[in-house]
Image: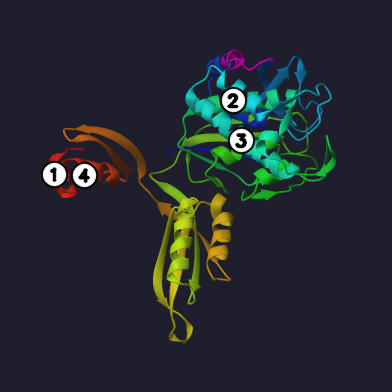
Amino acid sequence: MRILYLDCGMGAAGDMLMGALASLLSEEEQRDFVEDLNRIGIPHVQVTMQDDKKCGVTGKHVRVMVDGVEEGAGHEHDNGHSHENAHSHAHASMRDIEEIISGLAVSDRVKADVRAVYQLIAEAESLVHGEPVSEIHFHEVGMMDAIADITGCAMLMERIHVEKVVSSVVNVGFGHVRCAHGILPVPAPATANLLKGIPCCAGIVEGELCTPTGAALLRHYCSSFGNMPVMTVECVGYGTGNKDFEVANMVRAMLGETADGQDRIVELQCNMDDVTAEELGYAMELLRERGAKDVFATAVTMKKGRPGTLLTALCTEADKEEMAGLIFRHTPTIGIRESMKERMVLERRQETVHTSLGDVCVKVAEGYGVCKRKAEYEDLREIAENTGLSIREIKEQISY
């Protein structure tokens, strides 16, 4: 599996993530990327990228200029959304942002990613200000800077084509930051909302190390957070921030391959002797809908010989807090056991197979020297309803 590991030991900002991802490319590809980013149609924006050193380590430093002004100059990172910009007091809404994104000369996939990331930011700001997303407005210069950062990262993710993104624990820094509404604690409120469920730490550096843009990009792209997984590293890249500290102010990106189907997953378990069938069924259904990898119940014998139920939910580390909250809310349990599991999985993909009875989606799983193929049940059922054949007869007639 092609995997990207992001080391966010000094936080995350849009420009730093973009620099780290870009430095995974060849020098020629980096130049092409910057040229492409500058001509896709982001209004008033000019992006440059140059070599930079932090604590003796060379990385890429990205500068986003909006009408000749660099957002966040003088701060640890770009200040994106929640901070006052001295150069522009014009504001824009999510509708304005959507119009800009729709007009970009990029693929539909990149547009979808940019929309999704900016929607996360808007929802986080909405919670902070107690206003609907439609009423949230962004400072124009910060908005254009963020669109450039997010779009650049989305374009790079499309180019490097990874199947999984893992991030380290995110260092958010500590202290306070000045914004349009006064002095606020670090992480800034919108950033704190975006980091819900993501492992974070304050570290030893005072200042804002993780911005709303950085947090939203991590939430959108990363499927898990924690230590670096077992992987064969192919290339390493660094994206640098604006300031110099005793600790190298950079994001590190490591691109490579995992061994066949190695993965880590969180197992949540609880024993209950007073749950009703309706409560249990609803809780299990809700856990699956919210992203649990698997949910199952096992009959067990509890203390004093009482029959009970063991509920098990498997999920990513990023989702464990939400999963635990759902279990506590929708079952009678007052305690949940957590354990981290290593698992071996086959790599999966889907193919559409054209048969004499119609198109069938086939799930393909490969790895460890085996290949398994299984037709999608819903497609088989539709053919059965249309032809009157049994599912077994259909399987015998089609080749996939």
Mark 4 vs mark 2, foreground winner is 4
Name the residue type under label 3. Gln
Q: Are marks 1 and 3 in contact (CB under 8 Å)?
A: no
User: Which of the labelled discs sits on residue 385, or is there none?
Assistant: 4
Alpha carbons under labels 4 and 3: distance apart: 40 Å
Q: Which residue is mark 2?
A: 151
Q: Earlier in the sequence, mark 4 or mark 2?
A: 2
Mark 4 vs mark 1, foreground winner is 4
Q: Nearer the viewer, residue 367 or 176?
A: 176
Name the residue type under label 2. Thr
Determine the image quadrant of residue 219. Answer: top right
Q: Residue furthest right?
A: 182
Q: Position of residue 182 (x, y in %)?
A: 86, 39
Q: Are marks 2 and 1 in contact (CB under 8 Å)?
A: no
Q: Position of residue 100 (x, y in %)?
A: 61, 21
Mark 3 vs mark 2, foreground winner is 3
Mark 1 vs mark 3, foreground winner is 3
Q: Secondary structure at mark 1?
A: helix
Q: Which residue is mark 1?
A: 396
Q: Position of residue 382 (x, y in %)?
A: 25, 42
